[in-house]
Amino acid sequence: MAVTEAPAAAVVAVPAPDVLDPERGSLRWAGIRRRLVLGIPLGFVALLILACFVGPLVLPLHPPVGGDILNSALPPGSPSHPLGTDINGNDVLSRLLHGGQSSLLVAISVNLIGLVVGGGIGALSGYAGGWVDNVIMRVLDVFIAFPSLVLTIAIAQALGPSLPNTILALTAFSIPAVARVARSATLRIKTMPFVQAAELSGSPAWRILLRHIAPNITPQMLNFAMLGMGIVIVTEGALSFLGLGIPAPNPSWGNMIYEGQQSMSATPLLVLWPSLALLATVLSFNLLGENIRDEMSGR
Amino acid sequence: MSVVGTSVEQSAPRGGVGDRPVLSVEDLRVTFTRHGRRIRAVKGVSFDVQRGRMLAIIGESGSGKSVTVRALMGLLPPSAAVSGSAVLDGRQLVGMSDKQMRRVRGMNISMIFQDPARSLNPTMSVGAQIAEAVRTHQQVSRPQAAERVLELLRLVRMPAPEKRVHQFPHQLSGGMRQRVVIAIALASEPDVLVADEATTALDVTTQAQIMDLLVDLRERLGTAVVMISHDLGLAASYADEVMVMYAGQVVERAPTQTLFSNVRMPYTRALVEAIPQISHPSHTLLSVVGGHPPDPGRPVQGCPFRPRCAKADDTCLTAPPLDMHEPEHSYACWHPVTGHEVPVAAAPAAEIPGGTR
Amino acid sequence: MTGASVLDAPRRPDADRGFGRSGAGSPFVRLLARRLLMAIPLLLAVSVLVFLLLELMPGDPARNQAGMDASEEQVEAVRRRMGLDKSPVERYFGWLFGIFRGDLGRSSVSGQSVVDMLGDRAPVTLELVTLAFAVSLLIAIPVALMAARRPGGIFDRTVMVVSMTMLAVPNYVLAMLLVLVFAIMLRMLPAIGFVPLEEGLLPNLRSVLLPVLALAVPLAAFYTRFLRGDLVEQMNAADYIDTARAKGVGPWLVLWLHAFRNSSFGLLTIVGLNIGTLVGGTVIIEQIFAMPGMGMMMLEGAMSRDVAVVQMCVFVFAAVAILANLFVDLMYAVLDPRIRYGSH
């Protein structure tokens, strides 16, 4: 055999046997973990939507406003107030759910409008190219140049606090952002052979956009929309926190946090409940977004 | 050139005289574990490399040739398990800790990769990257390192070395970049230089220049070169010894002349036949080896080439050992090729892209 | 960064010829000029938008100023005095030229000139933003490097989970939690209030620590995730990493000198993109911590319908974001040798 001077053993690590082991359990575990990572946030979001939209109709909740000041700051677990009451005597659970309803409504509306309008503008701009593209992009650039919160605050305070105004203010920064993503996705798809084939065969532009471009930019748009849900919820929370969003006394997680701040040393839980709700919701949407993209790109 | 057989049966006695080989690999095995599956990339490879000689390792993608040399360098991911023996100048490489390996890498054995454009850090000047190679293993001052950098650039015949030193990779042509990569590899005058498809990304003219350079360096510095390629023609022109790998195993090995004048292994024969020759009449169909290599994640019964070999029969269900059946010529086959048979089932016409013309 | 410096000292004069490292014709200066030229119309467009936005505000500033029970003539007088009787276009240009002259208007609430107000408030915001910027990078870079050293290891996985969570926490919620823990429960730091530098470095730092953290941590989470991902991607796939390891360079040096150098460009880009977010975040953070900065100024102006103040604040914020992006672009051009030296 080989003559060596090194005293070290010739065989290290696991001597590989010639017989192949059957497929180990690790493969199955990887599959389970993947399902969990997708399933848990999905489940949470579904539960959330159910709780916030159906809950108030079905559950015997106290009304979210008009509480009795004598009932203020009851601790969690009090009779008929599972999470206690706030300093105005309103039931916290009820406010959480109703607030969630408002926040989610705003978020869904803004994202839908953003996807449709922004996505449309972006895809059109990207597909059209030339001076049309240039002009649209310059206009969008102006909006994007603003820090998002600043722009939103400026619009919101100009319009006044209310739910529809909040939606309007938030679309102002959502539409340009979505448009940009849609445009870059479109640019990438535009050069692909099947689009060029459709063009060569004489398909009109609107049909190409609808049948070829739109389906292919959908994965990225969906991913961005999920991230957008998180961002919009947070920004709406910020607006409501500052009193420029959903007007008090109507609950929103944002203004609940603000009210909780006032009495934070005495009743820290009042800040924690809406904070946790926000955190869990945004986290779920972020996770969903990441995993949808992975699923769609066939990981 | 000595050869050591392994696998199932006895090992052939070592033939040939000469110095002790600078690199001696024996029964090297590499297994990856991914998602609970075991992937046997290298299934018992043995070879020796003599000082100042060039060994070409030939094989198609997935034959395990890159994994073999990366195992020697310790450049495999943590999911790889390496067993066997690889002795470089008296030092056992298998089982070395990463820290020990780092001292060997670049110093005693170095490697150059396929695409010189991607092998160089785009944000560092070329001179800085060579200097790094110098200063990793030698305690020299900066001016001394700078001098050495120029020396190395001249060694690899780089035009205008003083100018190149401050330039960045994207400012150089492909051939120049590959010279820089070679300069980096030779910085500490290693015993062995491994070239992993080093000329594949270059155009034919540059390829010839770089190969000539490697030959020249080999003669001047006495560095042994292990050349990995899928290009038989290149091996035929430049290597001293050729080793053919298939499905993680060595299937044939011999000095270049011997191999090409007497191809034995049907697979090797098919590879040789596949080289387009000027001497063939025009419009001759290229003979293509039909099928594809076995999946490394699955066990193989017997000879790995059996499904694609026209000469295979039931004896091939037992794996043939790599034995030195003829002087200096080892192969692993029960039915070696003799004369001019064409041993593979020629691929049916439908498989050839474009059909017959 | 080290590495290139070996060859810096003994440089022959002819080595620089043709690479345009200085001089009016160099690609770098041309890039600078071009980007500046593009920024100016953008700034102008932004100013128009700002002006428009606040003109849309319902309510009549003149009436507000004159008071509830002022007569029509008095309101008209106030209107004329405030210059609101002119057409929007006239008012816009008046406003714009005022900026050039250094006259940024007056607060309709306090009468103080906006310039003075900015002078008081801007340093506070500047301190917050600069510190938050620095802290976010000081956290992100080492953490990402350590995580990328052993991908999939315990540290790496912990970092991924923590950063994922931190990303989902809005900065105002984080601020609340920080106040809850550090100010209320532990009583280590003040919950509100800004202590100016003149009154001592340590009290100043103590007063800004929590707001800076609230601003910096979500950004740090974002940068960490990006950087770690980029580093690991390079370590797995990049050929020049293989070359470096084949040279025998140690793993930390490979990460820092090779992988990080290449990642730094991507990092620079996203840092630049997020400067706007950072600056905008001060609005809400200053409110929470009662910091007398520009964000607070804008909010107060918004609440009291102080048009001049809000206009200037919004414009300044936007201008800062634009200029920061410009700066990032230029840094990119300076640092990336592929842009700086072009192709041969």
Image: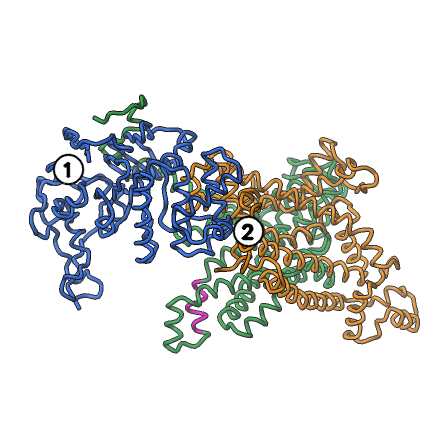
What whole-number distance in Å separates the C-alpha atoms at marks 1 and 2?
Answer: 55 Å
Judging from the image, what is the letter of the chain drawn in blue? B
User: Against B116, is A217 above or below?
Assistant: below
Q: Name chain A's colour.
A: green
Looking at the rendering, which quadrant does residue B47 occupy?
A: top left
Q: Residues within 10 Å of mark 2 (few under 14, many from 20)?
A: few
Chain C colour?
Answer: orange
Q: Nearer the viewer, residue B208 or C140?
A: B208
- Whether labels 1 and 2 belong to a single chain: the reply is no
Amino acid identity at mark 2: Arg
Q: Which residues are magenta?
A: A207-216
Q: Are marks 1 and 2 in contact (CB under 8 Å)?
A: no
Asked whether A212 falls inside the magenta stretch, the response is yes
What residue is disc 1 on? B328
Principal secondary structure, stretch drawn in magenta:
helix
In this figure, which residue is indicated by the disc labeled 2? C12
**Mark 2 belongs to chain:** C
User: Horizontal and vertical percent for residue A264?
Assistant: 73, 39
Q: Is residue C340 left or right of residue B11?
A: right
| Nearer to the camera, A37 or C40 | C40
Residue C160 at least partly seen: no
Image location of residue B357, percent across then percent down: 17, 68
Q: Residue at x 83, y 41 (%)?
A: C198
Along the viewing direction, whichever of B60 and C106 lies nearer the viewer: B60
B99 left or right, relative to B15: right
- Give me the chain letter of mark 1: B
Q: Is residue B313 visible?
A: yes
